[in-house]
Image: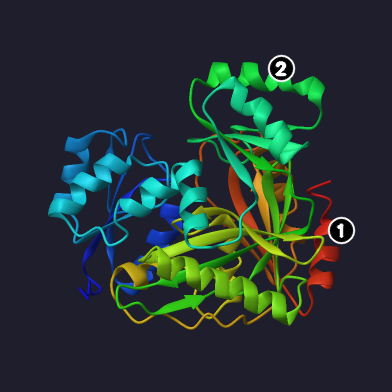
C-alpha cells in the first residue's frame, strides 16, 4: 500500500527504449530518474537525471542505484533476477524478483501458467536428445524448439518441420548446452496481446487488445482495435486479469496470445513490463502504458485506458530509419514519430516507431502502404 509521490526518484534497471519512455512519461508527472545500463549514453540515460554505467549483474552498482532511489523497477526481463532479489530485501522493488525469475525461463513460465489452468500450447521439457525424439512422437511435426532462457525477437527459437531436421535439432540442443522446451506448432489466425496494469492494492486495468503482425519473428505492426469478436476480446481480457491476479503482479505485464483457427485463445509468452505492442497507447489511449506502469508501481490510482482513436503502430528498424527520415515531411498529420536515441542503426535493431491515428484501421494501413517505407 506504499505510495511513492511525484518528486520522488525512480530507479530503472535497464537503459533501453522502454526505460526511456517510462522516464519521459514520469517526468511529466514530476518524478526524477536514475538508470543502470552497461551502454554509456543509453536511450534511458539520455532522459534520466543520471546513469550508472555497469553490468546488470554488478551488485555494488545496483546497490548504488537503490541508495539513490525511492522505488526500483526493471524495463526488461533479462536484467539479473538474483540482483533484484537482493535489492528487494533492503529497497522498495514492488514488481519483486519472483515474477522476473518465472518469466526469464520458458519452462518455469509455461509450467506456472499450466498450474493456473491457463490454456497454453502442449509442450515438453528437453533435457536429453532422447527427449527430442519423444517429442516427435508425442507432439508431432512441426514443433517449435526454444531455449529455456535468453532469446527475443525470434532468437533462440527453431521451427522443426520434418524428420530430416531432427538430427540438426539435436545438434542445436547440444551446442546450446542448456535445457530447452519444445512446443506443438499452433496454426493460428491471429497473434494478439493484452497489456494489463495491476497495483499493490490489487486494482487492475487492461488496455485494448492489439492484433500483432510479425515479420521474421520481429513485431512489425500492432493494430488496434484488433480484428476479433466482442466475445474473443472479453475472453482475452479475462485471461489477462486471471494471470495478473494469479501472479500477484504489480506494474505492467504483457500477455502474448494466439487465436487458433478454431477460435481458441492460447497464451504464448509473458513480459513483466511495458511492451512493444503497447506503444500505440502513447497516442491512442487516455493513459499510456508507460504512465500506467508508473502509477502501478508507485501505488497511485490506475488511469483510464479508453481507446481514443483507432491506431496502427509500426516499428522502425535499422533498415527503415533512413527512409523514415527522408519522408518525415510526407507523414500524415495524425502520425506520431517516436525515436529512441540509439547511435547506430543496425539491421533489425529497433530504432523507433510510428503511431498512425485515424478513423479506421483500414485507412491507416493504406496510409502506411502508400509511404513505401516498409516494402
In x, y percent, where is residue 1?
Answer: 22, 76
Indicate left or right for 268 with 83 as reference: right
Residue at the image position 20 percent from the left and 36 percent from the top: 59
Q: CA distance from mark 1 to mark 2?
A: 45 Å
Residue at the image position 73 percent from the left and 22 percent from the top: 166
Secondary structure at numbered mark 2: helix
In x, y percent, where is residue 65?
Answer: 21, 47
Q: Earlier in the sequence, mark 1 or mark 2?
A: 2
Name the foreground residue: 232 vs 365: 232
How is the rendered protein coloured?
A: rainbow
**Above/below status of 197 relative to 181:** below
Q: Is residue 44 visible?
A: no
Secondary structure at numbered mark 1: helix
In x, y percent, where is residue 308?
Answer: 63, 82
Indicate left or right for 268 with 167 as reference: left
Judged by depth in the image, the label closer to the viewer, 1 or 2, is 2
Q: Which residue is mark 1?
A: 370
Name the foreground residue: 278 vs 158: 158
Q: Quadrant of residue 323?
A: top right
In x, y percent, where is residue 52?
Answer: 26, 41
Residue at the image position 55 percent from the left and 23 percent from the top: 128
Q: How many marks?
A: 2
Indicate left or right for 129 with 260 as reference: left
Name the foreground residue: 134 vs 166: 134
Indicate left or right for 170 with 255 as reference: right
Q: Which residue is mark 2?
A: 167
Amino acid at each position: 500500500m506504499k505510495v511513492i509521490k511525484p518528486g520522488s526518484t525512480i530507479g530503472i534497471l535497464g537503459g533501453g527504449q522502454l526505460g526511456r519512455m517510462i522516464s519521459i512519461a514520469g517526468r511529466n508527472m514530476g518524478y526524477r530518474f536514475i538508470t543502470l545500463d552497461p551502454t554509456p549514453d543509453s536511450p534511458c540515460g539520455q532522459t534520466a537525471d543520471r546513469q550508472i554505467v555497469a553490468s546488470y549483474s554488478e551488485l555494488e552498482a545496483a546497490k548504488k542505484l537503490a541508495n539513490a532511489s525511492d522505488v526500483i523497477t526493471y524495463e526488461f526481463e533479462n536484467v539479473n533476477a538474483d540482483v533484484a532479489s537482493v535489492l528487494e530485501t533492503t529497497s522498495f522493488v514492488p514488481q519483486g524478483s519472483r515474477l522476473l525469475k518465472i518469466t526469464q525461463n520458458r519452462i518455469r513460465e509455461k509450467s506456472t501458467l499450466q498450474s493456473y489452468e491457463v490454456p497454453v500450447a502442449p509442450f515438453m521439457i528437453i533435457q536429453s536428445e532422447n527427449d527430442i525424439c519423444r517429442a516427435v512422437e508425442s507432439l508431432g511435426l512441426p514443433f517449435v524448439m526454444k531455449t529455456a532462457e535468453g532469446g527475443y525477437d525470434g532468437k533462440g527459437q527453431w521451427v522443426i518441420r520434418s524428420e530430416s531436421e531432427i538430427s540438426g535439432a539435436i545438434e542445436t540442443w547440444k551446442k546450446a548446452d542448456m535445457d530447452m522446451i519444445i512446443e506443438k506448432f499452433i496454426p493460428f489466425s491471429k497473434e494478439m496481446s493484452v497489456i494489463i496494469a495491476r497495483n499493490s492494492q490489487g486494482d487492475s486495468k487492461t488496455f485494448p487488445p492489439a492484433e500483432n503482425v510479425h515479420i521474421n519473428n520481429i513485431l512489425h505492426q500492432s493494430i488496434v482495435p484488433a480484428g476479433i469478436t466482442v466475445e474473443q476480446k472479453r475472453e482475452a481480457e479475462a485471461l489477462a486479469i486471471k494471470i495478473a491476479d494469479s501472479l500477484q503482479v504489480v506494474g505492467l505485464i504483457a500477455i502474448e496470445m494466439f487465436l487458433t483457427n478454431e477460435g481458441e485463445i492460447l497464451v504464448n509468452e509473458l513480459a513483466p513490463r511495458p511492451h512493444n505492442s503497447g506503444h500505440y497507447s502513447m497516442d491512442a489511449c487516455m493513459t499510456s502504458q508507460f504512465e500506467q506502469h508508473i502509477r502501478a508501481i508507485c501505488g497511485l490510482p490506475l488511469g483510464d485506458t479508453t481507446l481514443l482513436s483507432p491506431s496502427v503502430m509500426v516499428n522502425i528498424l535499422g533498415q527503415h530509419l533512413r527512409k523514415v527520415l527522408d519522408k518525415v515531411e510526407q507523414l500524415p498529420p495524425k502520425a506520431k514519430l517516436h525515436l529512441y536515441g540509439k547511435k547506430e542503426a543496425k539491421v533489425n535493431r529497433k530504432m523507433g516507431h510510428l503511431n498512425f491515428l485515424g478513423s479506421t484501421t483500414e485507412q491507416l494501413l493504406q496510409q502506411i502502404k502508400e509511404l513505401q517505407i516498409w516494402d
